[in-house]
Image (cartoon, grey):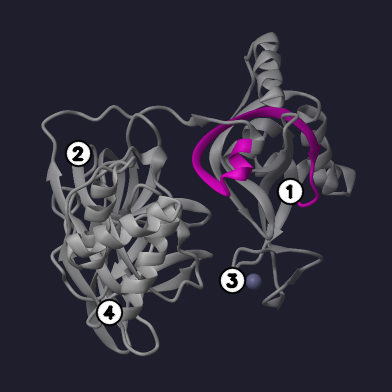
Amino acid sequence: MNIDDHAEELASDLGVDKAEVKENLQNLVEYSVPVEEAKRSLRRKYGDEGGSSSGGPTAVDIADIGPDSGNVTVTAKVLTAGQRSIRYQGDDHVIREGELADETGTISYTAWEDFGLEAGDTATIGNASVREWEGNPELNFGESSTVSKAEDFDVPYEVGGDRALADLSPGDRGRNVEAKVTEVEERTIDGRDGETEILSGVLGDESARLPFTDWDPHAEITEGASIRAEDVYVREFRGVPSVNVSEFSTVTELDREVEVGGPTRLSIREAVERGGAYDVELVGNVIEVRDGSGLIQRCPECGRVVQKGQCRQHGDVDGEDDLRVKAILDDGTDTVTAVLDRDLTEEVYGGGIEDARQQARDAMDQEVVADTISEKLVGSEYRVRGHLSVDEYGANLETIEFAASDDDPAERARAFLQEVEA
Ligand SMILES: [Zn+2]
């Protein structure tokens, strides 16, 4: 950029006369002030002059915004613009939210008024306040802010909200997805306005499958339908990203069928580092069958596992028999606990609950059931599919498939080495 370009950008950012800015800029540069420093000093100068006695907000690059930046002015391109209704101080309020970018970085925003911003617009947002949201700075603007169209410029980020399911993360807003509804059920919940009908289920595309909730049921969302859902947001649900469809989302049926891929194959370390993952496939050795496996008793009230007839919440209860396995799976990168429900446990045990009771009676010890399972599993390699959650209870995989691994060990060793060397 030459001086003229710099002056033009500054003038546009600051909303002042270009000729004046250019003269100031030229002076500074002639005194051997580096051009970026000269620009910063002019931003300070005009920012101060334009504001109140306490000093108005400074025009800043997005990369320089931190949680403590206070009030700022930014010129940015709108990457995404979603709508959401929230209850704030007792009132329902429609907010606009999404991501902004300039050449230096991106930042999330919440607009408390409708400034008519659409993805692809370029705007100068004056007097926005910076708040911290989950450890990151976020721009908030409303009645006391100004939003004006600015000259268009390119940013090295994707404009628009289209994403594959695998690329969604909790906190995303204004996203558009094309997916197949692989499971859906109607549910009645006790919402903030009393009983409400919602839909919940699973969406899938080539990249992943994710749970979803439709808070304002759309007729297009039926089992097996391939849909495009615009303006959805993403929350964390049981440790995995969950797609949220709202009254502001637009759902249309696609005239093509979306292919749904299989589970995402990850190393255990990758899966755990994601902080949770829906429908993943892990391959590892069972190194231990944990306490609380085999024949167990659950509280008839809450389903918790009871120990010596005591439920943690309901005290002395008459526990109901159940079968479960908690197996520690290790692939050399990390470990998870694969939790198998009664059906899967019956498969690995090779018998049902009556067989387990009989074995326990014969041995006069119900631990023999867990011992039998342990003898079968420990030391062998398994391919395990399920939903991983990572929380204060550790990394637990809610298992949906559990099968002996048919992997080529040499191929896996190569993959492992690659990861270690990466
Ligand atoms: Zn209980």
Badges 2 and 1: C-beta atoms under 8 Å apart? Answer: no
Distance from the alpha carbon under mark 3 to that under mark 4: 66 Å
Name the N-terminal-most of marks 4 and 1.
4
Residue in view at x 75 percent, y 47 percent: 293
Q: Is residue 340 left or right of residue 31?
A: right
Q: Is residue 318 left or right of residue 123?
A: right
Which quadrant does the C terminus fall into? top right
Q: Main secondary structure of the magenta part?
A: strand
Q: For this rendering, which residue is in front, 102 or 8?
A: 8
The magenta span reads 270-295
Is 248 inside the magenta-drawn segment? no
Task: Bin the neighbour count of mark 1 within 10 Å (Cα to Cα): few under 14, some 14-19, many 20 and up.
Answer: many
Frontmost of labels 4 and 1 is 4
Mark 1 residue element: strand
Mark 2 residue element: loop
Give the amino acid type for the residue marked by disc 3 in the picture: Glu
Name the N-terminal-most of marks 3 and 1.
1
Q: For this rendering, which residue is in front, 64 or 219?
A: 64
Q: Which numbered circle lies on residue 225?
A: 2
Residue 84 placement: quadrant:
bottom left
Residue under label 4: 50
Residue 325 placement: quadrant:
top right
